[in-house]
Image (cartoon, coloured by chain):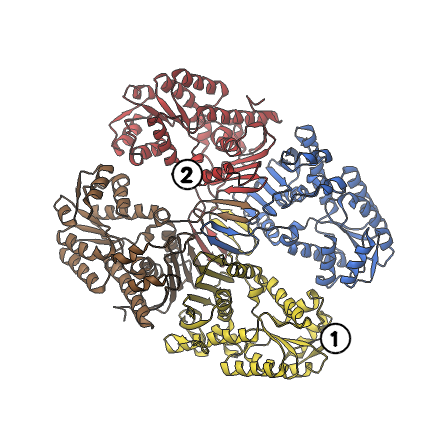
Chain colours: A blue, B red, C brown, D yellow
Amino acid sequence: MGRRHAENLRRLVPEAQLVAVADASVERARQVATELEVDKSFSSLEEMLGCDLEAVLISTPDKFHAQAIEVAAAAGKDILCEKPVALSLADGDRAMAAVSKAGVRLQIGFMRRYDPAYAAAMKRVEAGDIGEPVIFKSVGRDKDEPPLAAYQSGVNGMVFYNNTIHDFDLARWLMRDEVAEVHAYTTVAIRPEIAQYGDVVASVVNLKYARGAIGNVESYVQAIYGYDVRTEVVGSKGSILIGSLEKTPKTFLSAGGGTHILADHFLSRFADAYLAEVTDFVHNMLLDRPPRVTGEDGLKALQIAVAAESSHAQGKPCKVSGQG
Amino acid sequence: MGRRHAENLRRLVPEAQLVAVADASVERARQVATELEVDKSFSSLEEMLGCDLEAVLISTPDKFHAQAIEVAAAAGKDILCEKPVALSLADGDRAMAAVSKAGVRLQIGFMRRYDPAYAAAMKRVEAGDIGEPVIFKSVGRDKDEPPLAAYQSGVNGMVFYNNTIHDFDLARWLMRDEVAEVHAYTTVAIRPEIAQYGDVVASVVNLKYARGAIGNVESYVQAIYGYDVRTEVVGSKGSILIGSLEKTPKTFLSAGGGTHILADHFLSRFADAYLAEVTDFVHNMLLDRPPRVTGEDGLKALQIAVAAESSHAQGKPCKVSGQG
Amino acid sequence: MGRRHAENLRRLVPEAQLVAVADASVERARQVATELEVDKSFSSLEEMLGCDLEAVLISTPDKFHAQAIEVAAAAGKDILCEKPVALSLADGDRAMAAVSKAGVRLQIGFMRRYDPAYAAAMKRVEAGDIGEPVIFKSVGRDKDEPPLAAYQSGVNGMVFYNNTIHDFDLARWLMRDEVAEVHAYTTVAIRPEIAQYGDVVASVVNLKYARGAIGNVESYVQAIYGYDVRTEVVGSKGSILIGSLEKTPKTFLSAGGGTHILADHFLSRFADAYLAEVTDFVHNMLLDRPPRVTGEDGLKALQIAVAAESSHAQGKPCKVSGQG
Amino acid sequence: MGRRHAENLRRLVPEAQLVAVADASVERARQVATELEVDKSFSSLEEMLGCDLEAVLISTPDKFHAQAIEVAAAAGKDILCEKPVALSLADGDRAMAAVSKAGVRLQIGFMRRYDPAYAAAMKRVEAGDIGEPVIFKSVGRDKDEPPLAAYQSGVNGMVFYNNTIHDFDLARWLMRDEVAEVHAYTTVAIRPEIAQYGDVVASVVNLKYARGAIGNVESYVQAIYGYDVRTEVVGSKGSILIGSLEKTPKTFLSAGGGTHILADHFLSRFADAYLAEVTDFVHNMLLDRPPRVTGEDGLKALQIAVAAESSHAQGKPCKVSGQG
């Protein structure tokens, strides 16, 4: 992911100058630097902050996000940080406080907001084309079974923090309302061995909005058939569906039926969105404007994820922190 | 609905003989009898049972289903009754007891099981094509805002009994498992005046299955844009989607984009299913076989609806009666 | 096909009374009569015309259509005849003359005009939604390889008369213009043995309209993957596509991609159209109105088919008889 | 178009070094050079060839292609030239002779071969999944009415050379056979004023293949509703459809039906293809391999276009030069 961001910045955002890259593995940092013709590479954020930089892009494993934000903020840099902003409310609050104290700007990597289909959907909502939003629905399914090592490493949060958080952000953004309470059911039935790592294979999260709307978000980390992201905003006058079941516009017709290829990865499905995201960040930084997706957005999505985890653990609906 | 069943029986099920029709409005009964060239018409089930009949089809408002089953069973007739079997567990149990005591057969009108797309989906599930079922999803949206009189009359149950019960039945059937617990959020936000009648505009119901799978069912009674029924069964090896957003296979392309017409009514979307349902009932009765969709199926779907209403009323997850 | 018409008339058109059925095989006639509870059955049209009939529906092999029309017309009956009206212009003219002389009414079985999707498309055209029609496109593909006996029997015309004639009718109807000239390429490459029967496996026919528009119609009699009928009317302001690649609204998602079932037969694809066609015929006859699809329509489609066959035989564009 | 190629080369093909840009308008050349941080800019190909270059990419108006190829070949440069290779067979032959004499390599810009959907379709064909190809169909529609000035300038060829030539190339490539004869109908009915410039608004071209298959290609330069490119390869065992009617995976559902946005420009529809094309060219040049799409391919597509124009002019089928 970090590599993709670096490539986008280096090659496709002419206004940006990619000064340095850092990675815990200095070999990897060096290799990327060489390929992208970047002069400097480091093995830590702290070292890299010694360069003459205006902003940093943080794309570490989830559990290091909050601390990296604190360090970069303390160094006075503007920040684009991948989601989630943190894995706990305490960490999230501390990161936000650091940003606030330093007076820097923080954007969170909810790139779906930059996807042409999602952006066009939001325009429809804002134009009132669907009337008053009534129901929010979203499905997020990853293709391949994560390797067991991914669970064992513990560097990323459980599904609510790593996957569903995108839908939690959309749930706020597209409905233009706050989620006040959630209820989650989860399952490990087809892979019971991951329960010991506190994670689940699939989840359905019911949403209750502050102004009365409702919703549901489903996540499934090993759909096998493809990378399948679909969202629906249902209103009093109409509805908008975002998402597709085709990767390429090609259908094969045979005696076995009609067949089309399915999307398989977020890097291809959201390639345009990632580029638009980093471009927008660079433009806003250069023009001294606030970022479009803020640290506050990151924190609020995190609060929903925390409530979903509580509901999963306690078997009952849970209020979202900070909502009434 | 009763009229559609009568037409199907009279015209398209040659093995059946439609002996009589009854309606609380004797004029309506007479008119249908005339149009369909049926000799007898009555203003009550009781009167009609005086004819030489082998079976009755019950298609009254919801609240009269259970009692009508009791009466018909006591008269020794086999029964095809529209969903729901009853509006309360007590009524449902009494109806089932009457059927059992009389030794008659009872089929409940979950016609979706007879829809070619749903039936083909079930074959895929049974063949193991999607592996082990993990997530059940279903959406049921009616097109037009129900008239206020429909709420005031009180002859039909709230959304869970009148609409979602179809999805509750599919939830059991397609997953081949029982729903053990549910959690519901509901909303009246865009039509607060119906709250006084105990009903809601939309709902999302989280499902927890006995063997560990999960699910969610959404209902919306005034989608405005169309009649939209979609179901998905997601498994460990693949997924099946049932439902379509097109009424007719026709697309209009203009500078405003591509446009297609949406389905608008269950009588057209499920026309084939209604015919297949009543045909199957007639065949099974003639061949002394049990019905394919039983009173027990009707009762179990009712139990889920009752649990959903409890969850809506109490704001917490509720166990489904009879499950563990 | 005749059986389907008889069933529709007997069961689904209450205003019609099916008096008798006839078939060259009297056993078959008798069997259908029994099943449909029709009193009389005959082994020839001539015998059947002795009954008290107001109209006849002709559904013989193609080569007997024209003569049957003459006989029925001479007996003073109104007629619904399957396409094509005849297999030669001379036969077609003679049939039309007989109809005219007898003062009876003749409808030709271009049922696609009654299909909901085609009918809705025509409304769009008439409303001016696509502006001025510029290009007509149509594809008609049958699923299974016809048995060799079908070619050997010689009772049906080559592909232009038996299949493409539907598209030739649509070509006139949807464009509201006459086809003035055609050019055809054909192939027997994958089944050379049918060339001796004067038929082909596939064809593409370019169309030139009287008022300047253009078009193309493709036919393929052994597509193997399904029954695939699609039409497009392209105009100066927009376009309409009719047709679909799905039989049932169901998609199966697996590691092999997304799969849906394809339509496989015209009797299922156009079931509604066949019923609407015969219903409309009955209504118009009862109300003393002219039929909606006339013998003239049948003749003009035949003239295009004849020109297409000439082009196929001569290797050059051919004018359509009666056009300029 | 030239600008897009330059951007791709400069930013997304790390193995390539963009040395210089040239344009008849030296201001434009200078501006692009500045934006892309290229050192040199020129007002003619001849001047630019004075630089130390290994290859040139030609993206002039159509009528200058052939001459530019001759000049670049004479200078010993490998060439990637936009389609068509020339506007006449004489020019095409001369360009090919120059390439041959100079021993340089020439690739023609049929970028659709590099589109993921087309490439995947070709793999299906090569794997025998559709059996023996029987029918080739292709539709190419541009969105907006070309300005009259585009016709008046005369720098591009008529529709067959500028648009349909893409389909003519696909017709050869996907069917793995040569087109032997064509028949064209054209129309200017909705824009008669362009007839004086020898061009047309729409065309349908019937194809006859050397080994017996058939086909049809339609072009329409002012479809208004969108940029619509669809191709179908129909075989003895199945069929492949390439193309889609959606720009973004988003559907808006309202009482007016379901609506989706349509593709509007080839630069967005084929963005990936243009990049893959130029990348493949660079790789093949660096590795001393022949280009994947050759000058011979360009010439053969040109021969079909010339035959189509002859058919349009003469009103009869025309043999393709060089085919039997």
The disc numbered 1 marks a residue on which chain?
Answer: D
In the image, taking residue A143 as reference, residue B176 lies left or right, namely: left
Q: Residue at x 25, y 37 (%)?
A: C35
Residue sitting at the far top: B101
Q: Looking at the picture, which amino acid does disc 1 mark?
A: Asp
Residue linked to disc 2: B270
Q: Residue at x 23, y 57 (%)?
A: C63
Quarter of the N terminus of chain B within the rendering: top left
The disc numbered 2 marks a residue on which chain?
Answer: B
Quarter of the C terminus of chain B within the rendering: top right
Residue linked to disc 1: D39
In the image, taking residue A34 as reference, residue C295 lies left or right, namely: left
Whether residue D148 is visible to the viewer of this picture, yes or no, is no
Q: Please tell me whether residue A272 is drawn above or below residue B296 in the rendered image.
A: below
Point out residue C75 in the picture as x, y percentages from the top left corner: 13, 51
Of D254 and C205, the residue lying toward us: C205
Point out residue C90 in the picture as x, y percentages from the top left corner: 20, 64
- In terms of image quadrants, where is residue A166? top right
User: Disc 2 to disc 1, how far (Cα)?
Assistant: 68 Å
Q: Looking at the picture, which amino acid does disc 2 mark?
A: Phe
Mark 1 and mark 2 in contact (Cβ < 8 Å)? no
Dot 2 alpha-carbon crowd within 10 angstroms: few under 14, some 14 to 19, many 20 or more: some
In the image, taking residue A162 as reference, residue B159 lies left or right, namely: left
SS of the residue at dot 2? loop
Dot 1 alpha-carbon crowd within 10 angstroms: few under 14, some 14 to 19, many 20 or more: few
Of D197 and D87, the residue lying toward us: D87
Residue D136, numbered circle = none
Q: Please tell me whether residue A299 is drawn above or below residue A46 in the rendered image.
A: above
Point out residue B220 in the picture as x, y percentages from the top left corner: 52, 36
| Number of marks in the rendered image | 2
Q: Please tell me whether residue B112 is drawn above or below residue D310 in the rendered image.
A: above
Point out residue D246 in the picture as x, y percentages from the top left corner: 53, 55
